[in-house]
């Protein structure tokens, strides 16, 4: 971090600043010019409150040279992280498909969809038990019963399961869940992130709908700094001025993240678009941009789905998507894990 000090700074304030920075365990490289003094901070600057320094009377400007995330940073961990979800590997060149309904609705529904997506090539079953809905009057999920039905579908198909946690108090109920999803709305629920960081469960961390890439990586940092390195990122679209799609899929996040972090990167084209007919083209685009996998909503009867029917694929549409993404994966020199 570089601090540019204003002309002729008050000596006492300057001494206080130096003392404060040294008190944080950092060294300072001072270069005094005719008009300005530049301070180069040496050491772990992740503890420094950049905005606070900027607000000081004697400070002209502050520039961060090093990213504020350490555990998620590729600079300190050049090799891709590979996360094992019930025997299926995410990251490190592997390509995985997570598929299933938005919500678990009944035994028949979840088992039917699980069998269909497995036959088509998905390796992990998704299904929401606790649903974070915009309206309190909308279907809130089968909750504990939904988790039980997911376990049942797991036993029937042998597929590991992925489901969203919305409340830290329910964590003990997630014992049989293989991949715990943190949804867009909870990306900055820091107490939840810290608690998940104290487990060794793989975590699927979706991007908040108004989160910058750095904020998203700082949320990953919350989980990782508590000791859990099993984090998978999932781009699911961000809120923009465009109302035609539910969100705007930020495809550039994939290559940007590839440089910044070693964590696996998935894309969810279902929530990104809100429209079933856009799921295939966005999936192909995500594969082309280098995603490590996709999370896709599939329902056996989308018209009567209790949530997100408009963006859900029918099983046969999903099977077709898998075949088309396979072709593109081959062109990209990759192969879907089976
Ligand atoms: C979901 O996956 O069902 C979901 C609610 O996603 P998001 O948090 O990305 O909106
Ligand atoms: Mn959904």
Image (tube, grey):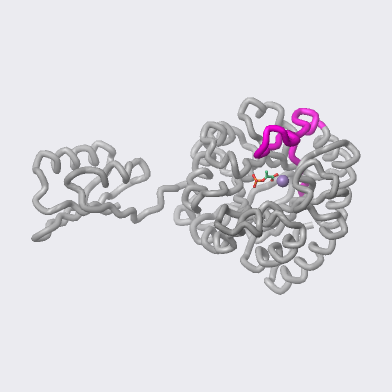
In the displayed structure, does residue 162 sit left or right of residue 110?
Answer: left
In the displayed structure, does residue 128 sit left or right of residue 208?
Answer: right
Residue at left 63%, top 42%?
Answer: 183
Work out whether 120 lies above or below 285.
above
In the displayed structure, does residue 171 sit left or right of residue 327?
Answer: left
In magenta, the rendered stretch is 123-148
Q: Is residue 131 magenta?
A: yes
What x and y, as percent, mark residue 329? 72, 68
Nearest to the observer: residue 29 or residue 322: 322
Q: Dominant secondary structure of the magenta stretch?
A: loop
Residue at left 71%, top 34%?
Answer: 130
Q: Is residue 39 magenta?
A: no
What x and y, as percent, mark residue 85? 70, 45
Name which quarter of the figure residue 270 lies in: bottom right
Work out whether 329 lies above or below 65.
below
Nearest to the observer: residue 36 or residue 274: 274
What x and y, as percent, mark residue 196? 59, 35
Residue at left 80%, top 37%?
Answer: 150
Name which quarter of the figure residue 169 lies in: top right
């Amino acid at each position: 971090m570089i601090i540019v000090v204003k002309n002729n700074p008050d000596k006492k304030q300057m001494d206080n600043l130096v003392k404060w920075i040294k008190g944080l365990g950092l060294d300072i490289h001072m270069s005094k010019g005719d008009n300005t003094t530049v301070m180069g901070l040496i050491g772990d600057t992740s503890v420094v409150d950049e905005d606070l320094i900027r607000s000081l009377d004697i400070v002209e400007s502050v520039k961060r040279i090093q990213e504020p995330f350490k555990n998620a940073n590729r600079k300190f961990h050049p090799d891709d992280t590979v996360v094992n979800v019930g025997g299926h590997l995410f990251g490190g060149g592997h390509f995985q498909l997570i598929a299933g309904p938005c919500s678990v609705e009944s035994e028949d529904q979840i088992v039917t969809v699980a069998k269909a997506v497995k036959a088509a090539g998905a390796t992990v079953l998704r299904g929401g038990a606790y649903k974070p809905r915009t309206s309190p009057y909308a279907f809130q999920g089968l909750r504990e019963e939904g988790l039980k039905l997911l376990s049942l579908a797991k036993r029937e198909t042998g597929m590991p399961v992925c489901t969203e946690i919305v409340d830290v108090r329910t964590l003990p109920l997630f014992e049989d869940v293989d991949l715990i999803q943190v949804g867009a709305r909870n990306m900055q629920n820091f107490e939840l992130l810290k608690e998940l960081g104290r487990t060794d469960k793989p975590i699927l961390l979706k991007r908040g709908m108004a989160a910058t890439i750095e904020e998203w990586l700082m949320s990953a940092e919350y989980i990782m700094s508590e000791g859990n390195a099993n984090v998978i990122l999932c781009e699911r679209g961000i809120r923009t001025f465009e109302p035609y799609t539910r969100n705007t899929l930020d495809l550039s996040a994939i290559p940007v993240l590839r440089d910044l972090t070693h964590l696996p990167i998935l894309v969810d084209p279902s929530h990104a678009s809100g429209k079933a007919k856009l799921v295939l083209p966005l999936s192909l685009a995500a594969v082309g941009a280098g995603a490590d996998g996709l999370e896709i909503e599939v329902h056996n009867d989308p018209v009567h789905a209790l949530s997100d029917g408009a963006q859900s694929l029918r099983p046969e549409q999903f099977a077709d998507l898998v075949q088309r993404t396979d072709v593109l994966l081959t062109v990209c020199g990759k192969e879907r894990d089976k």
